[in-house]
Amino acid sequence: MAIGPVQLIVLGFKDPDFHGEIIAELERLRESDTVRVIDALAVYKDAEGEMEVMHLSNLSTDEAVELGSKVGALVGLGFEGEPGAEAGAEAGAEAAADGISVFTDEEAWDVLGEIPNGSAAALVLLEHHWAVPLRDAIMRAGGFRISDGFISPLDLIEIGLISAEDAAVMHSLEQAPVPT
């Protein structure tokens, strides 16, 4: 199966009371063929750091069966149990044997560790359908990805894209809540 660029987005929430607005927007993006949600999890971390996890998804039943629990595998939740861990290890070993560099422990992203105690998070694995033609054109031209990332609203002030007031509001919305 050919797949477009994939991104894991981790969104934090002060309360685990998801209102459906996010799922509705993801569904709108899916209907416009902008993105596909490959997998999504809701994680609640209590004050002591104990986690409860629930699957969220707008995949069809066939897609869900085909893709399985990819976010859990990526972040080490191991929903597939020992067979899933073994399959992941085998796939990593095969990739390394083929000369594909897998990341080291120093490069690993501790997604679960970054979720503040006493909060909730939605972990959403998106396939960017809109980017497939661009990615393919870049590859045909001999290009390759060096790096990517979201730019902080505070950095956008310096280039005149947004006002300091707007950046301050956007930046405060992007920051994790301080545990009480």
Image: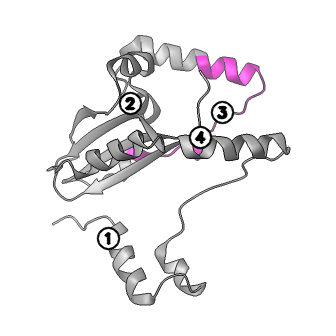
Please, what secondary structure does the residue beneath circle 4 have? Answer: loop
Q: What's the CA distance linking mark 1 and mark 3?
A: 33 Å
Furthest-front residue in this view = 32
- Where is mark 1, residue-wise? 173
**Side of 71 relative to 130 (left or right):** left
- Where is mark 4, residue-wise? 5
Q: What's the CA distance linking mark 2 and mark 4?
A: 19 Å
Q: Residue at x 66, y 33 (%)?
A: 102
Q: What's the CA distance linking mark 3 and mark 4?
A: 17 Å
Q: Amino acid at mark 1?
A: Leu
Q: Nearer the viewer, mark 2 or mark 4?
A: 4
**Side of 89 relative to 126 (left or right):** right
Q: How many marks?
A: 4
Q: What's the CA distance linking mark 2 and mark 1?
A: 26 Å
Q: Residue at x 36, y 67 (%)?
A: 174
Does the segment drawn in magenta span residue 125? no
Q: Quadrant of the N terminus?
A: top right
CB within 8 Å, label 2 to label 1:
no
Does the segment drawn in magenta span residue 95? yes
CB within 8 Å, label 2 to label 4:
no
Q: Residue at x 51, y 14 (%)?
A: 87
Q: Amino acid at mark 2?
A: Gly
- Where is mark 2, residue-wise? 72
Please, what secondary structure does the residue beneath circle 1 have? Answer: helix
Q: Amino acid at mark 4?
A: Pro
Q: Which residues are magenta?
A: 91-111
Q: What's the CA distance linking mark 4 and mark 1?
A: 26 Å
**Side of 174 relative to 6 (left or right):** left
The image shows residue 96 at horizontal and vertical percentages of 71, 24
Q: Nearer the viewer, mark 2 or mark 1?
A: 1
Residue 132 is drawn in which quadrant? top right
Mark sitting on residue 102: 3
